Image (cartoon, rainbow, N blue to C red):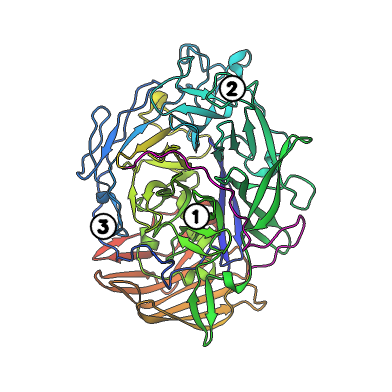
Amino acid sequence: MGDVAQIHHSRSIWQRWRIAVVLIALAMTGLSLQPVSASPPSTSPPSAATTPASPTSTSATQTSSAAATTTTSTTPTPTTPTTPTTTQQASARPITADPSEELHERFTISELPAPPTAPSTDAGSCTPTINPHGTGCLSPAWGALGAVGTYYPSSNYILVGAQLAGAPSSGAASTYTGPQVLLVHTDGKTFPNGDPWKCLTCGLTYPANFGGASGNNDFTYPINGFHDGKRALAGSAIIDCGNYQFTDPQCTPAQMHAYPLYWDDGTGKPGQLREARLNPDDEHIGFNYIITSAAQYDEFAFMGKLTFDQSNSRYDIGSVRMLYNPASAYWPYAVDSGNRLRFNPAGMIGEFRGWTADGRSAVGIQSYESDNVDAWATDNTTGRSRLLTRHAMYTDPNAESPDGKHLVSEQLLGSGRMDFLGGMQGVPPLTDQAGTTGLVSGLHDNVNRRFFLPQLVDPNTGRSEQLEPNGNWNTAADPAWLADSSAAVWAENLACGANPSPHTCAGSPEPGGRNSRVMIARFPGFQPTPAPSVPIAPDATWGLPYQPGQAIPARPHLAAGTYTAQGSIQGTAKVVVTEDSSKALVMNLAVTYTDYSDTPGVVLNGTESAVRDSDSAISAMTLHENLQMTGRHQGTKKTSEPNGFTMSPALLQSNFQVTGTLTTTIDGRAYTQPANGT
């Protein structure tokens, strides 16, 4: 039901590459006519907020010790390098965050240790003066620290992806180079050699002939630890230290093996595994797969079971099922008699992003409100979906705490990046069904510069709290939790423009001027609990079973016609859909709102439409907006007319290029778009 052009991106630690993917699907669209579960997120209307001054970042000297701690509570005060201070997260919220939708948990934020920084990437630049232990240096470039992963046997450690540089060309220290997995102390202690980190993969070779096909062709992304502490998913391989846990001094690169993941996609060769993530049951895995042919250019999510193939020294993925089903039971918008649209939260995977803590649901990203992308959990057995985040603007990196009580979600909420487009709450994602989601999603980056900020989320209500007060640092890759669910960890990069690769931002306060750091937020109010034992998760029986080489059915879309969507509180929305001559694409979707309300205190009137500029899956799209919001807040969402607001396909490569203007105004304050190319 509908087609969506979606930018998808796979990340390495030092450089991110993108694949622009056209999803002919409603799977990335849809979703907010009715409550999504028995306990839906708060539906309070938005409130106005002032724009705060950016607090100064926590600084550090060239040392492996953690930076100063910042305590977050209820009084706004900028942080300083030397003295613990307080800030108020609520003051940093944009127009789109009502105070009733915010969490107010106390937390302390500090920086985890990392190797010293090489002055350059030249061989030998990591000298004994910089690192007397000869255990490597970080690259000074943007993105040197990235994905993190839980180490389940102990909360005193975390797994970290790192890009090392400056190693000598020969000798024992020459192995400390390139993308590697580190085990990092979180308790202020050190390993026997005096370092607070240990390189697990230095000297280990990534499996040949597998990385290129996988899409994740090094050890650094993603990183998911197994509960035994001896293994971890690292990229599209599983690193395994045999009889030894990673913390054991006898776990050395000589004992470590890297076993590739193998999935037959019908070609008889290793199939692509995009965004692969280990299920908490340690036996299942989920991943995305891109299909390219003359007739189809799409991405689908899959779930399978890991089996070790001793004879081929690899992990095979078997019992594969798609996290997709074209049956009408899994359409986000069902069509009832009289052409009435009915919201149906099921199969909301879009792009697969991981698992819930119990492994029983797959996490994906989909639209909940217009021009927003939120996180959903879809039950493996029933295919029913429940909303995890609310009005995130855009999110994809997410991690649920092992106890399942909280979520760390990297979002554009709070960045101000998308307020001009998605800031008005209560607008159902009807125009999204025309295929705008991919272009809208491209706003989350400016080429390599990411605008994500970490949010603590209650997955039962969608209420959230921003953890990083400094907008000059943006989160990178996947976050993680300590095994006892008492603290969240993420990597972040200094923001300075489009960050072409190679790139280094000037003026970094970090040791050696590095552009990356790993942060930990500890929550005094969270009772530390041992990581639970996770039973074997059920297979995704709602999805289609998959055999190598079988044809994947085309996605349905909302057919041409006139429909009516009833507001869950009051009013109606008249929806007119126009298809192309082959009925393959939605060319125009126009909506007229009459006293429409899904959200208490928010009433919508006016019109909007999304028009595909060419009869092609990859096409510019033009928005025409003339919406008025009344109730607790007054607002408008308007485009320049008569030509509207046209989004270029360049947005699929995270290059903001538009024609015309789109402005959202709430309670007299106008929110405008960024300049082209920024």
Q: What is the magenta segment's predominant secondary structure?
A: loop
- Measuring from the top left, give residue 491's x and y in whole percent: 44, 37
- Which residue appears at 59% of the width and 25% of the height? 244
Q: Nearer the viewer, mark 1 or mark 3?
A: 3
- Residue lying furthest bottom in this view? 338
Look at the numbered disc 3 and give the secondary structure of its residue.
helix
Cα separation, mark 2 vs mark 3, equals 49 Å
Where residue 49 sits, quadrant-wise, is bottom left
Amino acid beneath label 1: Gly
Q: Nearer the viewer, mark 2 or mark 1?
A: 2
- The residue identified by callout 2 is 251
- Residue lying furthest left in this view? 75
Look at the numbered disc 1 and give the secondary structure of its residue.
helix
Q: Is residue 513 left or right of residue 103?
A: right
In this figure, what is the number of numbered marks? Answer: 3
**Front-most of residues 317 and 294:** 317
- Measuring from the top left, give residue 580's x and y in whole percent: 62, 76
Q: Is residue 337 above or below residue 201?
A: below
Whether residue 542 is in magenta: the answer is: yes
> N-terminal of the two: label 2 or label 1?
2
Q: Is residue 672 above or below residue 111?
A: below
Residue 144 showing in the rendered view: no
Amino acid beneath label 3: Pro
Residues at marks 2 and 1 touching, judged by CB atoms closer than 8 Å:
no
Label 2: few (<14), some (14–19) or many (≥20) C-alpha neighbours in 10 Å: some
Q: Is residue 95 above or below residue 18?
A: below
Cα separation, mark 2 vs mark 1, equals 42 Å
- The residue identified by callout 3 is 99
- The residue identified by callout 1 is 442
Label 3: few (<14), some (14–19) or many (≥20) C-alpha neighbours in 10 Å: some
